[in-house]
Amino acid sequence: MFCYLSAFGRLWFLLAMAPLSRTETYPSDQRAGYLGSLDPTTALRIYGTAIELPFLAGLHVATLGRSGDLRVDHPYLAKVHARLERVSGNWLRVENISADRKNPIIFGHREVSECYIKPGDQFRIGDTIYYALDEGMRLARRRVVEILGETQNTEIDDCLIAAAVDADRHVVIIGELGSGQARLGQAMHWASTRRHNQFIPVPPAHMPGSADLQSIRDARDGTLLIWLPTRGRFDQDFISNLMAPQTRVRLIICASSAGKVNASFPTSVTEGAARVTILPLHARKDEIPVLLDRWFIENRSSLRFEALAPRIQSTLLSHRWPRNIQELQAAADHLASFSHYRSEREAERDHSTTRGESRAWRKRMNLSLPLVLNAPAPLVPKAPASGPIPITPASGATSRKRVK
């Protein structure tokens, strides 16, 4: 039909069929980022606390306030203070709808009537800072809490925000042997937008050419976790290839001290990197019962720390734990395995456990069985009594004497 029109008709047709302009619900300069997002915001969290405000599934609009959908009992919040609306992908539009506007929304160090946030972004109302989370950040938080400590709320939030906000920023994790550096690095990978790509750990390598260069190519747009050797510097040939602009990887560097990081990597990596320090387990022994109970539950064991004998509890709390979280988790496995034994002999008769391993662990920890007070007796079938089995006569039948 278009080919039969005159030149004037074709011009009129093109002008009439031009697409209508539409009002965007997101800033035009960030349109590509909005439409390219995959993981929606599923909760708000109050920074530095254990308070999380989850969104109901399928809810596109929610309110924040003392009587809102997300309730926070703070005196500087109105009954309905802010309106939260999903606009596209993982972006959230936050609008101040309070009547008096006495406590404005602070975003980017300035007062705004509305702002757009994605997972990891923050805004402030009064003295309270809120930040957004997606499902990946919420799942990763459980692992981060386990490694950094139940009471380190500010450090946990800083770790998650650093992982999510700038996925290109490198991370340095300082901690002792067995403190869970690799697990924390993997949790930060899950909390970032790079979780859709590979996470590859690189073992310590100090000899030139000893590190595998293929791992750099495999981790493109993903994360490389690098363990620094206890002695010497990391393979400098590997580091020089890693600094090439086409690598496009995020580095998570694990070391026992900051000096080892500065000796192996250039200042372009170390200066702008986020730094996370893991406290040794002997500095937070009050969390040992919580950690043990968590691992007992994960292993589907009915054992709990309170059920252990007082001498066992005292030994666990006074131990130095030189291998930190790694050693404590191994102890949780041993405790769950030996909790139902009432004596050493009974444990040695069980072929499902290695005698040498169980003896070595209990000797090192100076533990003796039973571990649990009033341990339940194992279900053992009773042997039949000696002598002839009595015959019970049926109803209505006459019993006969047994002939000797």
Image (cartoon, grey):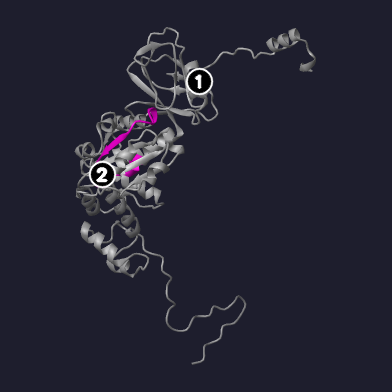
Q: Which residues are magenta?
A: 164-185
Figure check: 398 above or below 112: below
Image x and y of residue 159, in percent: 33, 32
Spatial CA distance of label 2 from label 1 is 41 Å
How many marks can you see? Answer: 2
Circle 2 — which element? Answer: loop
Q: Which badge, 2 or 1, comes first in the chain's sequence? A: 1
Q: Quadrant of residue 176?
A: top left
Residue lying furthest front in this view?
7
Marks 2, 1: nearer the viewer: 2
In percent of the image, x 27 and y 51: which residue is there? 327
- Residue sitting at 27 percent across and 61 percent down? 369
Mark 1 residue type: Arg
Magenta stretch: includes residue 125: no
Q: Quadrant of residue 347?
A: bottom left
Residue visible at 22% across and 54% down in the picture: 311
x then y, percent, for residue 127: 32, 17
Q: Position of residue 63 (x, y in %)?
A: 48, 19
- Label 2 sits on what residue type? Phe
The vertical placement of 327 against 58, above or below, is: below
Question: Magenta stretch: residue 173 in it?
Answer: yes
In the rendered structure, find residue 203 and report the number of the disc placed on it.
none
Under circle 1, the secondary element is: helix
What residue would you read off at disc 1?
31
Q: Which residue is mark 2?
A: 234
